[in-house]
Image: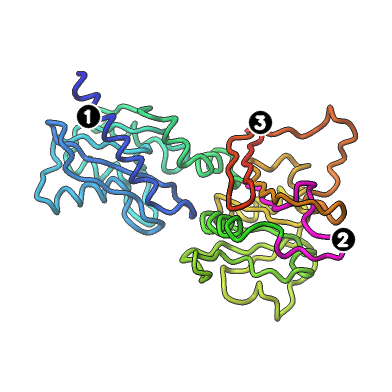
Amino acid sequence: MPRRDADEREAMWRALELAARGPAHGPNPQVGAVLLDPAGRRIGEGWHAGAGTPHAEPAALADARSAGHDPRGATMVVTLEPCRHTGRTGPCTHALIAAGVARVVYALDDPSPTAGGGAGVLRSAGLEVVGGLLAEQADTIVHPWLTAVRRGRPWVTLKHATTLDGRVAAADGSSRWITSPAARRHAHRLRAQVDAIVVGTGTALRDDPALTARDENGGLSAHQPLRVVVGRRTVPAGARLRGLGGPLVEVRDHDPSAVLTSLAEHEVRHVLVEGGPTVAAAFLRAGLVDEVHAYLAAAYLGAGPAAVGDLAITSIDGALRLTVTEATIVGGDVLVVARNQEE
């Protein structure tokens, strides 16, 4: 059925656009859905707006009903396999079956041990189910979430801002500001998309950072990630980390695996490691960095601390090599995004 295939493909592209409207942070994935009537006309659409809100499929059903459309016999096109479990909301499989939807087309299988398997539930109820439509495109939207769920530990992005010779500060310790205002605003948008920001106690005590996510006007963003300090020392009572912003979590451990295990218990899916050199090196040595965001300022210092501490690499043959996925000019700086080749 060429016409039906074309309608469903077009609907999936729209569902991907809708999915991107949802928050990138939080325990749940970004999902979009489009409901088509038996003639292939779009009669409802929805997306998941965050934990505790209706999932994309019920939102699309509600949208159709509010416009006077009957979902019986319709096709639900959705970016992720409908869930089968009851969490903060009811199972999407039940909503689809109860609504009389006849066909479900989805992009990606849900790897969650509790939510996954919804396709089988729908088939058992007599619905026609097809998976894999535009799966690669859907993966780009929820890749950190998918990987975190599959592995059972958060996706880790290492972020640093350096001069061209890899310095994060001058020899006298001064470091504000290495990169341009545009690059710093860009980095704050990244903070607003993650669940947690990690630094070591050395950075916390030396720099007294706030680790907040700021909007374009310098105010606090609506979402504030957890502020995580790794190490044995305690963050002082008057530290900025104890002020406005996300909750402070102190992990009394230097083992990156233990840190990620602790954060997984907080339903963290995406971690941003911001420093300092010792913490960055620890995560790299442990093989727990999935992606790097490196902001490069067109400047040289010639001396001063480096972005990453000793990795115990003594030969060029042992270099930790990443795959560059993006290189973008941001203000007067360059952002290089690279992923672990084993990811």
Can you give x and y, in whole percent of width and height, for residue 219 in the image? 51, 71
- Residue 4, given in percent of the width and then of the height, sits at 20, 25
Determine the residue positioned at 20% across, 45% down.
Answer: 44
* Left or right: 194 as drawn, with respect to 5: right
Position of residue 120 measured from the top left corner of the image (x, y, whole percent): 34, 31
Mark 2: amino acid: Ala
Magenta residue span: 156-177
The residue tagged 1 is 7
* Separation of residues labelled 1 and 3 (CA atoms): 36 Å
Give residue 228's quadrant in the image.
bottom right
To which residue does mark 3 refer? 341
Q: Residue extending furthest bottom?
A: 238
Q: Nearer the viewer, residue 336 or 36?
A: 336
What secondary structure is found at the residue carrying circle 2? Answer: loop
* Residue 174 sits inside the magenta stretch: yes
- Disc 2 to disc 1, C-alpha distance: 61 Å
Residue type for callout 3 = Gln
Left or right side of 243 for 255: right
Tell which circle, 3 or 2, labels the residue nearer the N-terminal end.
2
Image point (39%, 52%), residue name: 22
* Alpha-carbon span between mark 3 and mark 2: 34 Å
